[in-house]
Image: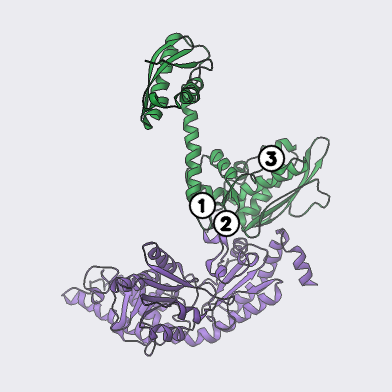
Amino acid sequence: MWDYSAKVKDHFMNPRNVGEIPDADAVGEVGNITCGDALVLYLKLDKKTEKILDAKFRTFGCASAIASSSALTEMIKGLTLDEALKITEDDIARYLDGLPEAKMHCSVMGRDALEAAINKYRGEKIEATHDDEGKIVCTCFGVTDKKILRVIKEHNLKTAEQVTYYTKAGGGCGGCIPEIEDLIAQVHKEESAMAKAEQVSKPKVLTNIQKIRMIEEVINTEIKPMLQKDGGDIELIDIDGDKVLVALRGACSQCVGAITTLKNFVEKKLQEYVADSIFVEEVKE
Amino acid sequence: MKIIYVDNNATTQVAPEVLESMLPFFKNLYGNPSSMHIFGGQVARYIQIAREKVAALLGCDPIEIVFTSCGTEGDNFSIRGILEAYPLKRHIITTKVEHPAVKNTCEYLAKRGYLLTELSVNREGMLDLDELRASIREDTAIVSIMYANNETGVIFPIEEIGQIVKEHNIIFHVDAVQAVGKIPINLKNSTIDLLTLSGHKLHTPKGIGAQFIRRGTKIRPFVIGGHQEKGRRGGTENVPYIVGLGTACELAGKNLEKENTYVKILRDKLEDSLLNNTPNARLNGHKTMRLPNTSNISFEYVEGEAILLHLSEIGICASSGSACTSGSLEPSHVLRAMGVPFTAAHGSVRFSLSIYNTEEEIDFIIKHTPGIIKNLREISPFGRKELKESLR
């Protein structure tokens, strides 16, 4: 038994705006009967202002799918298309005083249908912004890596189970769960790198001493460990304005790819964390 | 609001007679049956009486009955206890439509190196016995097949299956949790070696089960501990519940005829009416080889959870094999194994009756269900054309 809020129950028992708009300006369809839920959304627009004059829906699905569809149509009436596009699945859930986490994919479906309808109306290629693009990760429910990455980022999801709640991916045979876990790890790695970058993020003006300290720190924390993993090492020799002089040690000193390492990795990292103007030169001893 | 309970394959109302018989063991008769003093020791007598009552319902010797905590324990005990007793045999045969207590136990063992064969079923939920014959191997340790299916009520030809199994000297386990008390079972001249039952499907409270182990069957205990149940199941006896199960089995024997007349008539009335008065409704499972109390009906183009919540709003308690009700995202493994199309599997509803249901209750369900289906179909984008055509 799901613990539904009074508002979910109300929108399920008495759904608003059920039906079709025969001369709809925009129609969005998502889901299918195999997956267990599907939604068709119809919009009537004031073409000059792009305001949504009327919205109707038909949904096949459980109580939360019906309630989410009903809520969405209520929320978007009177909005312009641009305003409507800003509605997130969390907004839909909030409007309903919350949805059980395992049912979040129902509100995701509403958002996807809205996006599909608007894209179709504007004549944009649906693939251009829709999650259909990308590699299919979950073959049971046809969910792409792009969609999975989006929900992981937007909702800061930490487990494959949560991804299933939001997208259904992994909820069938479960064969793609390792791949989903890789995607989660990928997102959180990116995020922690970004957070770090922000921590040491480039201040507008650097004194010389600040610059030297930062270069030292980046070399020690970001660059050295990576090179050491491959049996190499790096030593900071001197800093002259924007010129950073380093010596490559260990495996790196004999490596034919050393110049690439220097330019593509060491210099890039220093530019990223300290200043764009930095360039690196190797000191041969 | 009056509750109309038609979800008896999930659990049942505690029979007043059962509760009454249990009460003294929550009060004065609290002794431990293993104690040397008379105060405790006298309780052992009541356990023996209960054992005799369970044995009487099943047509076996009381010594062949072991009390357990539930059906799931019995299923685990049977399968794992046999594999441990026959360490050189590595093959298990079961079906694709078993209850999770058997299905997940077997899948777990398959991951640990055992070889598993899961027999298919046809559209009516019936087995192909030639597939069983072809699956048997030199090292098959156990064949575990349910008596009757919990979702559809389909009854397997257990004795026919048992003949095949025993030709090869393989242990035959039957999960009879749904069958006991609903259809006659006599283990005296049966091919069954191990049979599992659960009390709460028979009007006891939850937390008691029993296991039939044919005399001479080599099996290792699953719960290891004291000497209770002749060392076959350790742990101090759950005396009040064992006594309750005894009473429930005695009642079940008396009510067996009512299950197959009164309950069956109510079930048939409900089923025929819903199938005739709702367009695009279909029965899941064999029409006649079925428990007298169970009806599994698919209402195409609508989703099961939505139906259940509408029924629940007017006091009707049923269940569904839809994805949204199972906690997983795929509809029931039983319906999928039967090849029920997705359009219908998501919209399945199981009604399971008991002797406590009345004709008035059934009429109430008959009156309100078609309207709920019609309203949900109004909301659904699917099947609009098909429904119009079928109504023409």
Whether tag 1 and tag 2 are in contact, CB under 8 A, the answer is: yes
Front residue of B186 and A262: A262
**Left or right: where B19 falls relative to B49:** right
How far apart marks 1 and 2 lie (CA) works out to: 9 Å
Work out whether B334 lies above or below A194: below
**Left or right: where B120 falls relative to B298:** left
Q: Residue furthest bottom?
A: B189
Residue on which the image places disc 1? A176
Residue B202: in sight, yes or no?
Answer: no
Q: Position of residue A62 (x, y in %)?
A: 61, 57
How far apart marks 3 and 1 lie (CA) works out to: 25 Å
* Upstream in sequence: badge 3 or badge 1: 3
The chain coloured green is A
Q: Position of residue B200 (x, y in %)?
A: 42, 72
Task: Give the position of the C terminus of chain B as an image quadrant.
Answer: bottom right
* The colour assigned to chain B within the rendered structure: purple
Q: Amino acid at mark 1?
A: Cys
Q: Are marks 2 and 3 on the same chain?
A: yes
For the point 70% across and 71% down, the residue is: B280
Task: Give the position of the N terminus of chain B as an image quadrant.
Answer: bottom right
Front residue of B306 and A43: A43
Q: Amino acid at mark 3?
A: Ala
How packed mark 1 is, by other alpha carbons closer than 10 Å (few <14, some 14-19, many 20 or more), is some
Whether tag 3 and tag 1 are in contact, CB under 8 A, the answer is: no
* Tag of residue A140: 2
* Tag of residue A97: none
* Upstream in sequence: badge 1 or badge 2: 2
